[in-house]
Image (cartoon, rainbow, N blue to C red):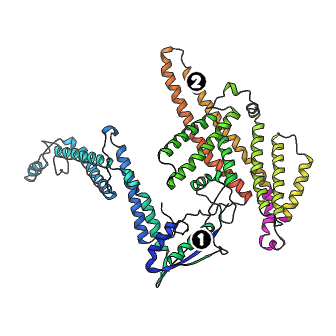
């Protein structure tokens, strides 16, 4: 569900402004819109965080540039010192580049003494017939240039080693405090003052209002909490059922949130996303690989102390999701008998394997269309039930009938069904009456009449929405075929020669092709999930459910 919000107006004594913000931060219950803050103090705090991030990048880059086997002694250093060392190194690099250019320029003339040459030329002696000299004489001789260049390179190496010996974790541990400082300075700027009082507005979840009211009573704040007014856009706080809570991190990772007035679609999103994940990856072997990596993640999570911190809780949610997704993919591998592009002989006679292996692919397309119809009809029926006390709910049930008809029509067009039965036309006719007759109420035709004119186009697009689910079959099949082709290439390499002494070399080539081929295929499977699984949930399903994802997530003013 989407948690109800209350708008908060808080007034305090201006002299207690910072203490008030500290208490609000401790409560962790009030959402403040800190995005608009851009004052000098906020910029300075953000600059500190940027410097810390830059320092970490500098350390890691320096460590990659030296021999890791040297056994560096890592010690914490201030960010300012790390940045100063990097600035010195950059200056030395510029000096070394200039010396390298000069050495290359004057090397053809040998190691002559430019001071002596200058004196002789000033005395009027013509040296053109004796030695080849450059048009412009250098300040120092070539040997000194080389010595200076070598000294610069030695200092660069020493500075790089010193930077590599800095402890990046000591800097990383400052990140939460720096994030807190940015948020606090932003809140301080947001909290305006008028004479002897300071005031700020925000949003509080309904179930946290009592805690805020108790703090106000204790601290002597003036407090007003009210229902959102028309035109206001509260933040969205989703509270799915416990079993489906991990999907919140997926929403955060995608940067999406339903609007406050829309529905929480966490449960169907996670269920169908798991199914889409499995079908798009399309290979139980890849599912086993994801599961193994997830188990390593669980091990690291438990070693790190579990979800004692906010980052630990986020990591746990991701691990739960990946466990579900990987198990779903393994399950699909069992149903379809696909394991790294090959089949297991003892699964070949399973009914599901034979059904999905239909050479015409009609069974697979039927499955995709059925998933699509169930997904979209769920959206319409859910919406209709949620507005059951409104006469316009009939239009939503009408849309469900339209989708059912389009599902039958799609299968008939492909040749999966022999034709469209008579009862389907009856359902379609009744559904059209419901859609056209009850989409708008009597008084809404003047302001929203254009929606009726768009209905024919929307009804035709419903056919395309169902057909679009065939991407689950197409992308999954492509993944399997790519894996099969790489397997074939690897076997061809291994069988390229019958000579026994060449077999170890050919086996190495076969292994290389398998690793590269399946690695690329695995990466493309991840990309297809981001594109197709997300789209089917956030576009096709959401359009029929009326979820625009135009909201912004509830982020309380709290300590990191």
Secondary structure mostly seen in the magenta stretch:
helix
Secondary structure at numbered mark 1: helix
Residue 453 among those drawn in magenta: yes
The mark found on residue 491 in the picture is 2
**Relative to residue 481, is residue 137 depicted above or below?**
below
Q: Nearer the viewer, residue 146 or 347?
A: 347
User: Farthest residue toward the left?
Assistant: 123
Quarter of the picture holding the N terminus: bottom right
Q: For mark 2, does the 10 Å Cα neighbourhood hold few (<14), some (14 to 19), or many (20 or more) residues?
A: some
Residue sitting at x 37%, y 53%: 170
Q: Which residue is mark 1?
A: 210
Q: Horizontally, is 433 left or right of 286 in the view?
A: right
Q: Horizontally, is 397 left or right of 201 in the view?
A: right
In x, y percent, where is residue 181? 43, 65
Secondary structure at numbered mark 2: helix
Q: Nearer the viewer, residue 215 or 152?
A: 215
Q: Which residues are magenta?
A: 438-459
In x, y percent, where is residue 496? 55, 20
**Relative to residue 342, is residue 130 depicted above or below?**
below
Q: Horizontally, is 66 left or right of 194 in the view?
A: left
């Amino acid at each position: 569900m989407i948690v109800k919000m209350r708008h908060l107006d808080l007034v305090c004594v201006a002299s207690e402004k910072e203490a008030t913000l500290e208490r609000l931060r401790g409560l962790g219950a009030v959402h403040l819109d800190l995005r608009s803050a851009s004052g000098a103090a906020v910029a300075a705090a953000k600059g500190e965080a940027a410097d810390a991030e830059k320092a970490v990048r500098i350390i890691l880059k320096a460590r990659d540039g030296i021999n890791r086997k040297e056994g560096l002694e890592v010690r914490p250093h201030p960010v300012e010192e790390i940045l100063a060392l990097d600035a010195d190194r950059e200056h030395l690099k510029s000096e070394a580049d200039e010396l390298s250019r000069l050495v290359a320029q004057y090397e053809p003339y040998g190691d002559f003494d430019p001071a002596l040459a200058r004196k002789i030329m000033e005395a009027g002696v013509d040296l053109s017939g004796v030695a080849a000299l450059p048009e412009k004489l250098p300040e120092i001789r070539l040997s000194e240039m080389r010595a200076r260049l070598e000294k610069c390179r030695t200092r660069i190496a020493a500075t790089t080693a010193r930077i590599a010996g800095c402890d990046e974790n000591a800097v990383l541990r400052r990140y939460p405090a720096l994030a807190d400082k940015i948020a606090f300075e932003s809140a301080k700027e947001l909290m305006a003052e008028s004479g002897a009082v300071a005031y700020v507005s925000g949003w509080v979840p309904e179930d946290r209002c009592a805690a805020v009211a108790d703090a106000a009573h204790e601290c002597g704040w003036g407090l007003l909490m009210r229902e959102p007014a028309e035109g206001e856009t509260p933040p969205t706080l989703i509270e799915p059922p416990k079993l489906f809570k991990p999907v919140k991190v997926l929403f955060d990772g995608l940067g999406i949130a339903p609007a406050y007035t829309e529905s929480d679609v966490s449960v169907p999103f996670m269920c169908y996303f798991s199914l889409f994940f499995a079908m798009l990856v399309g290979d139980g072997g890849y599912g086993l690989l994801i599961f193994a990596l997830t188990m390593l993640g669980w091990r690291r999570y438990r070693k790190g102390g579990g979800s004692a911190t906010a980052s630990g809780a986020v990591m746990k949610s991701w691990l739960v999701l990946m466990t579900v997704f990987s198990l779903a993919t393994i399950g699909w591998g069992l149903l379809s008998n696909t394991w790294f592009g090959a089949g297991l002989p003892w699964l070949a006679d399973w009914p599901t394997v034979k059904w999905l292996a239909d050479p015409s692919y009609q069974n697979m397309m039927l499955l995709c269309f059925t998933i699509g119809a169930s997904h979209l009809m769920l959206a319409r029926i859910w919406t209709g039930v949620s507005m059951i006390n409104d006469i316009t709910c009939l239009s939503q049930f009408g849309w469900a009938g339209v989708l059912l008809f389009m599902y039958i029509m799609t299968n008939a067009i492909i040749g999966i069904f022999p034709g469209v039965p008579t009862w389907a036309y009856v359902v379609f006719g009744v559904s059209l009456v419901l859609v056209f007759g009850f989409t708008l109420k009597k008084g809404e035709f003047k302001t929203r009449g254009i929606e009726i004119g768009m209905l024919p186009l929307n009804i035709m697009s419903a056919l395309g929405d169902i057909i679009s689910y065939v991407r689950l079959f197409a992308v999954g099949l492509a993944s399997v075929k790519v894996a099969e082709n790489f397997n074939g290439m690897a076997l061809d390499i291994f069988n390229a020669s019958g000579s026994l002494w060449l077999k170890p070399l050919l086996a190495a080539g076969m292994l290389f092709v398998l690793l590269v081929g399946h690695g690329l295929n695995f990466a493309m499977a991840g990309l297809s999930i981001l594109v197709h699984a997300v789209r089917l949930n956030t576009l096709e399903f959401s359009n029929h459910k009326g979820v625009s994802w135009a909201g912004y997530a509830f982020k309380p003013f709290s300590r990191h």
